Amino acid sequence: MTSNTEAKDVFRKGASSLANGEVEESIDRFSRAIELDREFALAYLSRGVAHLQKNETDNAIDDFTKA
């Protein structure tokens, strides 16, 4: 996992949003975590899951590939 504390914090908020069904919010937060740490594989994976929930298969595949 990343050593970037801010990225981890934003990621946790994204995970919480996703768990609460706030898919758009989770995508925004996972994207922010990725901006903070471009090698944050779990953020890419989680954003991919969120994209799948929105039936955005191409975006999901892109994120899974990056993860």
Image (cartoon, rainbow, N blue to C red):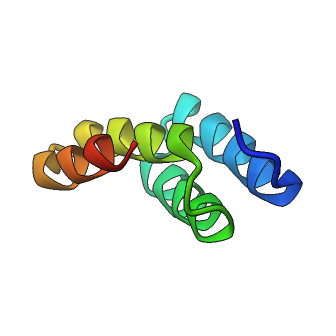
Q: Residue at x 34, y 43 (%)?
A: 48
Quadrant in which residue 42 is drawn? top right
Left or right: 20 in relation to 10: left
Image quarter of the N terminus: top right
> Which one is in front, 31 or 38?
38
Quadrant in which residue 64 is drawn? top left
Left or right: 65 in relation to 44: left
Q: Residue at x 58, y 33 (%)?
A: 20
x, y percent for residue 6: 84, 59
Left or right: 7 in relation to 46: right
Q: Residue at the far top: name it.
A: 19
x, y percent for residue 43: 54, 45
Position of 29 relative to 40 (above/below): below
Q: Residue at x 34, y 50 (%)?
A: 66
Q: Residue at x 87, y 52 (%)?
A: 5
x, y percent for residue 57: 13, 45
x, y percent for residue 53: 28, 37
Image quarter of the C terminus: top left
